[in-house]
């Protein structure tokens, strides 16, 4: 086992570091005003705890709510706050583990025992209870919808309560159906958040949740103002520094994504948040690779053992859950191989088994593609079968979203295996099915994008089969969803050139050179070719 594997094993079971809960300076987290019936001495501390919660600093927020309870042990709303922090990041797809559910339910029961003093406060507590109660018999998506509806009722009954409106909008965005391509929940949530942001420009939750609500390609442009503001509202918070990169990624603004994640990773290091640093590093690696800065991406790959040594999956309090850390550990080297078309390198990636099957699937999928594209059909078949096993484990865990994502990967791997076996028609049909499945859903916030977009893979397959016209259409479809992706732009240039469409080929070559202006020199073969194409009369 190599050093990274040993580090992965030794980090499991480490006690949470108290330093992770050190809060940032009070003037650097934004402004929140949340009225409660608790003792007046708790007001500033309660507002501060809610502000921390709005930036998903769950550990410091929990410490803040506990500090309120030391001043006023009968403050039922402080227990509500603890129940809210226990849920963690609502945008991280995945079923919450039993220990997390128990922690939240205990806080709900303590809130009830403390005795909420107003109907409004009772509404908050009974709403959050819906996330935790009957978890053994009611699935998580249903409970999320129930919480959303309870918050809608509270917000309607308390029209002057901006926090109720904000938390309802957050619940609506988090509960959105990833297969709803009308984005009705996200648009409704965003409209509420934008209206409030116009009058509360220093509120951390508003900027934060606007980015999340619009974190899909057709809506991402709506979040640009919030993305530009959030880091300034809460500049001490690693998650506030990272979140703008969600928008920058969705619109293909790679330089701003890199800058955001350099700052976020540094803040996460100060916070002792290994998971958040890994998450920021994955987004950063993705942006480097889209701009052809392969040497910078390589440095991140080489830094992984150091990052893993700081990653404590038992720690609580980070916006990035442990699954995000495991995902980044797998994704960074996989991206580095696949984005460069280093198929033999991808086939040799080492699997570091984790408690997160969809993170393990990242490595297995990359190995499957690498093996198929180097002609090793035995290894490709083994990897495709391993993806099926990981999918089945996720089904058993009732992880509907992630089991579907791994099934998309399995179908893509199977398609390239069929191509390697010479079954061309079957390969194209299987790849089209995978692309249609991916079209019907959306990526999760845990990742900047698919490891290898299915339509991009389809375009590359069609190019390999000497069908440049259809290949161009697939690359263009990819770019509508994943703007400024290096491989899709380079593929479109090549497809247009092979189809005899010189003006379109030149247009995409120029776009590639613009995207990759900071790229290594001479850089990837696609860049050398693009420079030659741009120089032709």
Image (cartoon, rainbow, N blue to C red):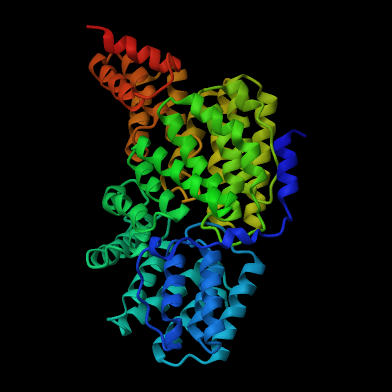
Q: Nearer the viewer, residue 504 or 16?
A: 16
- Looking at the image, can residue 433 be seen? no
Residue 497, placed above or below residue 127: above
| Residue 184 % position (x, y) | 32, 61
Q: Which of 320 and 309 is in front in this view?
A: 309
Locate the N terminus and report the quarter of the image it occupies: top right
Q: Nearer the viewer, residue 500 or 77?
A: 77
Name the residue rendered at 34%, 32% in the picture.
484
Name the residue rendered at 66%, 21% in the picture.
376
Residue 82, placed above or below residue 382: below
- Looking at the image, can residue 177 be seen? yes
Residue 17, placed above or below residue 288: below
Image side of residue 144 versus residue 182, left or right: right
Q: For residue 367, which quarter of the picture?
A: top right
| Residue 279 % position (x, y) | 52, 46
Locate the C terminus and report the quarter of the image it occupies: top left
């Amino acid at each position: 086992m190599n050093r990274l594997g040993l580090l992965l094993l030794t980090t499991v079971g480490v006690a949470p570091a108290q330093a992770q809960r050190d809060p940032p300076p009070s003037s650097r987290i934004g402004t929140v005003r949340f009225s409660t019936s608790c003792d007046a001495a708790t007001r500033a501390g309660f507002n501060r705890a809610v502000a921390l919660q709005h930036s998903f600093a769950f550990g410091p927020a929990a410490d803040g709510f506990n500090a309120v309870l030391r001043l006023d042990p009968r403050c039922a709303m402080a227990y509500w706050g603890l129940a809210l922090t226990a849920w963690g990041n609502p945008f991280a797809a995945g079923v919450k583990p039993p220990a997390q559910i128990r922690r939240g339910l205990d806080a709900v029961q303590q809130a009830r025992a403390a005795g909420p003093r107003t109907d409004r406060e009772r509404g908050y507590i009974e709403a959050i209870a819906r996330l935790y109660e009957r978890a053994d018999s009611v699935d998580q998506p249903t409970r999320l919808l129930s919480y959303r509806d309870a918050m809608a009722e509270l917000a309607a009954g308390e029209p002057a309560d901006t926090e109720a409106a904000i938390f309802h909008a957050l619940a609506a965005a988090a509960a959105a159906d990833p297969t709803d391509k009308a984005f009705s929940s996200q648009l409704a949530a965003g409209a509420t958040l934008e209206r409030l942001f116009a009058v509360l420009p220093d509120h951390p939750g508003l900027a934060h949740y606007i980015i999340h609500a619009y974190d899909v390609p057709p809506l991402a442009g709506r979040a640009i103002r919030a993305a530009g503001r959030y880091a300034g509202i809460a500049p001490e918070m690693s998650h506030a520094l990272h979140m703008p990169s969600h928008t920058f990624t969705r619109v293909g603004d790679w330089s701003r994504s890199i800058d955001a994640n350099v700052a976020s990773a540094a803040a996460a290091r100060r916070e002792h948040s290994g998971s958040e640093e890994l998450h920021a590093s994955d987004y950063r690696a993705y942006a480097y690779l889209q701009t052809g800065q392969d040497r910078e991406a390589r440095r991140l790959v080489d830094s992984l053992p150091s990052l893993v040594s700081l990653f404590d999956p038992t720690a609580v309090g980070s916006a990035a859950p442990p699954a995000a850390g495991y995902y980044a550990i797998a994704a960074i080297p996989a991206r580095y191989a696949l984005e460069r078309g280093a198929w033999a390198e991808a086939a040799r990636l080492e699997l570091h088994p984790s408690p997160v099957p969809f993170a393990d699937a990242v490595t297995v999928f990359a190995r499957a593609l690498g093996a198929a594209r180097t002609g090793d059909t035995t290894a490709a078949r083994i990897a495709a079968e391993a993806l099926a096993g990981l999918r089945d484990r996720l089904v058993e865990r009732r992880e509907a979203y992630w089991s579907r994502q791994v099934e998309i990967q399995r179908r893509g791997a199977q398609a390239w295996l069929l191509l390697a076996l010479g079954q061309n028609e079957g390969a194209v049909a299987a790849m089209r099915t995978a692309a249609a499945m991916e079209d019907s859903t959306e990526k999760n916030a845990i990742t900047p994008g698919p490891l290898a977009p299915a339509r991009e893979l389809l375009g590359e397959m069609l190019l390999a089969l000497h069908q440049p016209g259809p290949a161009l259409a697939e690359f263009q479809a990819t770019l509508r969803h994943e703007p400024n992706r290096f491989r899709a732009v380079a593929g479109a240039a090549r497809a247009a050139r092979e189809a005899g469409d010189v003006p379109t080929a030149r247009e995409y070559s120029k776009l590639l050179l613009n995207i990759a202006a900071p790229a290594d020199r001479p850089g990837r073969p696609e860049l050398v070719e693009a420079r030659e194409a741009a120089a032709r009369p």
